[in-house]
Amino acid sequence: MTNHKPHNESLLKGQTHSADRVSLSDWLAGAAALPTITLWQPWATWIMRGWKKIETRIHPRFECLNGKRIGIHAGLRVDDSPIVTHNPYLTREQIIFQPEDVVCGFLLGSALVTGFRRLNDRDSNDALIDCGWKQARWGLFLSDIRLAPKPIKIRGAQGIWTFRNGGTG
């Protein structure tokens, strides 16, 4: 497990989408609570940069998030496996990142889940991982990425957890 420096604007370095910073109330879209998932880095940053458009799992338990805005939390772990360090779906410049380019232990933003289904090999480019494996992969299709007004230092959890302004619930 690796901890990294507090958030800075380097999270946005290399951003290729139109994610905007908004006020906390606008970001929460009037909701009292935000269902949230925690991802290892750099996967969470890749979502916030618009590079990873499908979040995958090997189970269908996240289907309940379909049609909802969800929080994207960067967990405390950094994935340094070959699928990250030699990802065939990203350019070399996208793969290479400095530790200060990613932050861990922060709620980074949110995304709208516009679909959920079992994935196939045609989904690999948007998922940044091979989806044609014999093992089933299920995907949350993400759009309307919104950066939090300021990344929020908060402890994440496995599965789906709830962010409430001021803490978890």
Image (tube, grey):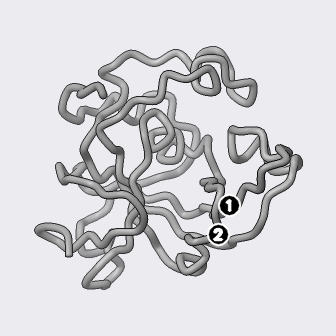
Q: Nearer the viewer, mark 1 or mark 2?
A: 2
For residue 139, the mark is 1
Q: Does 22 appear above or below 131?
A: below
Is mark 1 in CB contact (under 8 Å) with mark 2? no
Q: Residues within 10 Å of mark 2 (few under 14, many from 20)?
A: some
Quadrant position of the C terminus in the picture: bottom left
For this rendering, which residue is in front, 86 or 165? 86
Residue 28 location (% of width, % of height):
32, 74
Q: Does 151 appear above or below 10?
A: below
> Which amino acid type is shown beneath numbered disc 2?
Pro
Residue 7 location (% of width, % of height):
23, 35
Residue 12 location (% of width, % of height):
40, 35
Task: Tell me what residue is drawn at x 44 percent, y 68 percent.
Answer: 70
Task: Tell me what residue is drawn at x 30 percent, y 84 percent.
Answer: 30
SS at mark 2 in the image: loop
> Which amino acid type is shown beneath numbered disc 1?
Gly
The residue where tag 2 is placed is 60
**Left or right: 65, with 87 as reference point:** left
Task: Tell me what residue is drawn at x 72 percent, y 55 percent.
Answer: 137
Q: Does 56 appear above or below 77?
A: below
